[in-house]
Structures are given as C-alpha cells and as structure tokens.
Amino acid sequence: MGTEFIPNVKTLPVEHWLKNIARSANTKAHIRNLMHLLFNCAIRWELIGKNPVELVRQSTKRTRFPRVLTPEEFRKLLDELQEPYRTMALIAGCLGLRISEILGLRWGDVDWENLTVLIQRSVVGGAVYETKTEASRKPMPIDPQIAESLLRLQRRAAYVGPDDYIFAGSSGRPRWNGIMLTDHIKPAALRAGIGKIGWHTFRHTFSSLLHQAGTSLAAQKELLRHADIQTTMNIYTQAVSADKREAVQQVVKTLMNA
C-alpha cells in the first residue's frame, strides 16, 4: 500500500494489508471506513468506476479481553501518582469517564451541594466538542471521597473560575492525554508493578465493578452513558438517581477501601 495508483487498488490486497497491520480491530474498521469514503469520492470525481473497498471484510471483534484492574492494583497506582494525575485516575476509575470527558470538565460542571457533575463536553487533540447524546449529558453522582479530592485540587489550582478547566495545563487549556499517559500514567503503573495500562483500562474497571456489585442494567447503561440503548430497554432509561448513586458509592468503596 502507498505505492499504487488509485485505479490499480484491488479488494484482496487491501484486505490482506488491513489484516496484517499492527492495530486493534476497531482501529482497522475505522481505517476501512475512511478508505471506503475516499474511494467513493474518487468515483464521484470519475477517477475510478467502482469502490475496491466495498467488499473488503473487516471484523471489529476484539482479539483480546480488555484489561481490568483489581482494587489492590488501583490503589497501588494511585500511590504512585502525583496531582493532578492522581485525581484524574480516581475520576476515571470511580466514575468511568473517558479521558476526553475528563479533560473537558470545568469547575462550573460540579454541583457541590448535590454532589453531581455534568458531562457536557469532550476534548480530543486540543479541540473541544459538545457531547453528542442526551445520555452523555445526564448528571453523574460524585462520591464524597471524589469531591474531597477535587476540592483539594481546586485549592492548589491556578484556574478556578466556573469556565476554567479542572485539569488545565499551565496555559489554562486542557492537557494532552497521550503525553499524560506516556509520561505519568504508564510509568506509575510500571512502578506499581501492575504492568501496561491505558486510559480505557479505568473505564473497563468501572464497568466490571458495576456488574460485580449487581447494579441494575438500566443504572449501568446510564452510568456508562452508552448511546446504543437497546429498544427493549427503553422503558428503563430513566434509572432512579438513588440507584446510580449507590452504585457509584459501591465502586468507590471497593476501589478505595481495603
């Protein structure tokens, strides 16, 4: 790939190339979809007569199970992290937020009186995006331990206005997740003796603990803010807030208390 003219690209070589690149199945599927879009543009511009990616087969099935941390591993990791990365990991593990959502948090999103936080935006590559679905914008319950950690961070922060980012860098803008992962999270995980992890490891851990705690499927879906709620579950989409708060408190208790 990369050496052929557009009219010479064939289905089977593309499929073979995708199969052998060192990327996850999900990433490969994204690459295939992007190529399909580009070749459709080529058809529109009359450069080719058919799309060679149309028949390319690409499975999105996981090749391995996602990593899930034990409570002991999570606590060891926290012990190796300095602020603000410790609080970021705490929120990721105890609320299941994506790193893009954590980076998008502003102080004004936190309701200290009712102990909730609104997930209203995400930050990817320095660009700020609003959340796309109603499920993502629903308030998340905050456990008192998380609130205390945020308050300690706020007392030390340079940017504390309602519109300021909670995890702002020195410029006041959101930090870059890849740099934080490489320079802080992964080295801390190695020092803690828990091996290789990524930002999504925290979300998988949160999801696993919700399931182990016997949390209702409705509350799980709302806490994870999944958009693809099954039609058969539609009548349960408004899970009782008390159930969600109890579920989050159970996860925090499991992760934080030996």
Image (cartoon, rainbow, N blue to C red):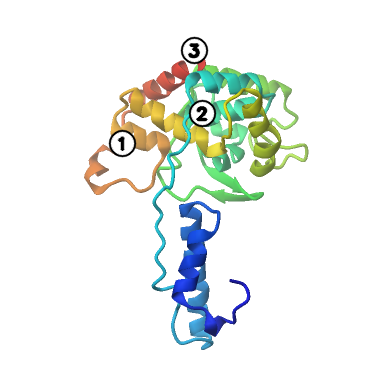
* 248 displayed left or right of 129: left
Q: Nearer the viewer, mark 1 or mark 3?
A: 3
Spatial CA distance of label 1 from label 3 is 30 Å
Question: Horizontal and vertical percent for residue 128?
Answer: 61, 49
Q: Are marks 1 and 2 in contact (CB under 8 Å)?
A: no
Relative to the observer, which residue lies in front, 109 or 199?
A: 199
User: What's the residue type where badge 1 is placed?
Assistant: Gln
Taking the view exactly as shown, the residue that stands out farthest to the right is: 170
Q: Which residue is mark 3?
A: 257
Q: Nearer the viewer, residue 165 or 66?
A: 66
First-in-chain label (1 vs 2): 2
Q: Nearer the viewer, residue 10 or 70?
A: 10
Task: Determine which residue is flagged by label 2.
Answer: 93
In the depicted structure, whether residue 207 falls above or below residue 44: above
Quarter of the image where the N terminus is located: bottom right
Q: Is residue 137 left or right of residue 152?
A: left
Q: Which residue lies at the image location 68% right of the left edge and 39% below the top edge?
A: 182
CA–CA distance in space, label 2 to label 3: 14 Å
Q: Is residue 103 above or below residue 147?
A: below
Viewer-nearest residue: 223 or 196: 196
Give neighbour class at mark 2: few <14, some 14-19, many 20+ (Cα, 10 Å).
many
Q: Secondary structure at mark 3?
A: loop
Real-space CA distance between mark 1 and mark 2, rounded to the nearest whole angstrom: 23 Å
Query: Crowding at label 1, few (<14), some or many (≥20) Cα neighbours within 10 Å?
Result: few
> At x 28% / y 47%, what residue is drawn?
230
Q: Earlier in the sequence, mark 1 or mark 3?
A: 1
Where on the picture, by quarter, is residue 189? Answer: top right
- Any part of residue 166 in sight: no
Specify few, some or many for label 3: CA neighbours under 10 Å numbering under 14, 14-19, or 20 or more.
few
The residue where tag 1 is placed is 238
Residue at 64% x, 42% y is: 177
